[in-house]
Amino acid sequence: MDLTISNHFPDGSASHVGDAVLSRPVIIKIRDTFRDVRITLRFSTTLQYLFADLSLPMVEYNPSGSSYNAWFGWFPDILKQQHMTFNNHICSFNRQMEQQALPYRLPFAEQHPMLKFPDVAFPTVVPHSVLVENGPCSSQQCYIDMNSIIPRLINDFKDLTFYTSSLSPGAAANLCNCGHLDLISLSRLGDRCLALLTRGSGVNAACYTEVNRHKPRAVLGWNYPFKLWDDSFVKCRSYEEVYAFLKGLPR
């Protein structure tokens, strides 16, 4: 059977990069479980590199035939019950297969699978470093601008080095701009850091790797009523709470 897997909004436009990158585990699960299913991925050209290592054909349009949309919000009731988690994908996949009278079903997962990207060459990351997601968010999940606190971070924590995912304000010996890196490289950078300070957007999603499963992670200004993936992050509502999070990191 041919199955097109995508991640898009009801109007057909592409969903946000965080939703797309967290599709990887369910795509791999479907590929490895149903050997008779021939998968084609539908993602925009700007996102296709995130799936290139899976060696699956990719298109930008939606071919006719059977399909599965891996967007977390495709079914509002599933989003409300399962939040933005792997089991949201499982429930949504099973319902979409049932709606299309297809026999394929996936079991619930007791533990969230994590992302695994191909290794990439990267310079040595200094000890006691923090990956900071400071770029814009595509939706309203974060109500605090990370760039507004970076000058305070680099001044208050001179024993930490901050690697920012986008161009950041100011310059300091403990501030490194990594805005030239793509999400795969930023994910691998996050693997090498002591902690993650994010806005709950695409960089945060790309850093849900096995290495980071139990790593200290904080999301600044989280504005959604939903759990995100394994929900293992500290919710910081102010600079004072970010300060407390960073102060508590092992040195």
Image (cartoon, rainbow, N blue to C red):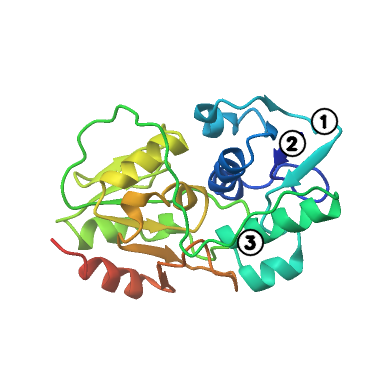
- Can residue 147 be seen at all in this image of the molecule? yes
**Three-letter amino acid code at disc 3?**
Asn
- Rendered residue at 80%/43% (across/down): 12
In the picture of the structure, the residue carrying the numbered disc 2 is 4
**Three-letter amino acid code at disc 2?**
Thr
- Rendered residue at 44%/65% (across/down): 220
Question: The C terminus is located in which quarter?
Answer: bottom left
Gap in Å between the C-alphas at discs 3 and 2? 18 Å
Gap in Å between the C-alphas at discs 1 and 3? 24 Å
Q: Position of residue 175 (x, y in %)?
A: 26, 45
Q: Position of residue 75 (x, y in %)?
A: 76, 62
- Rendered residue at 38%/64% (across/down): 218
25 displayed left or right of 148: right
In the picture of the structure, the residue carrying the numbered disc 3 is 88
- Rendered residue at 41%/67% (across/down): 232
Gap in Å between the C-alphas at discs 2 and 1? 7 Å
In the picture of the structure, the residue carrying the numbered disc 1 is 63
**Three-letter amino acid code at disc 1?**
Pro
The first of marks 3 and 2 along the sequence is: 2
232 displayed left or right of 34: left
The first of marks 2 and 1 along the sequence is: 2
**Quadrant housing residue 48:** top right
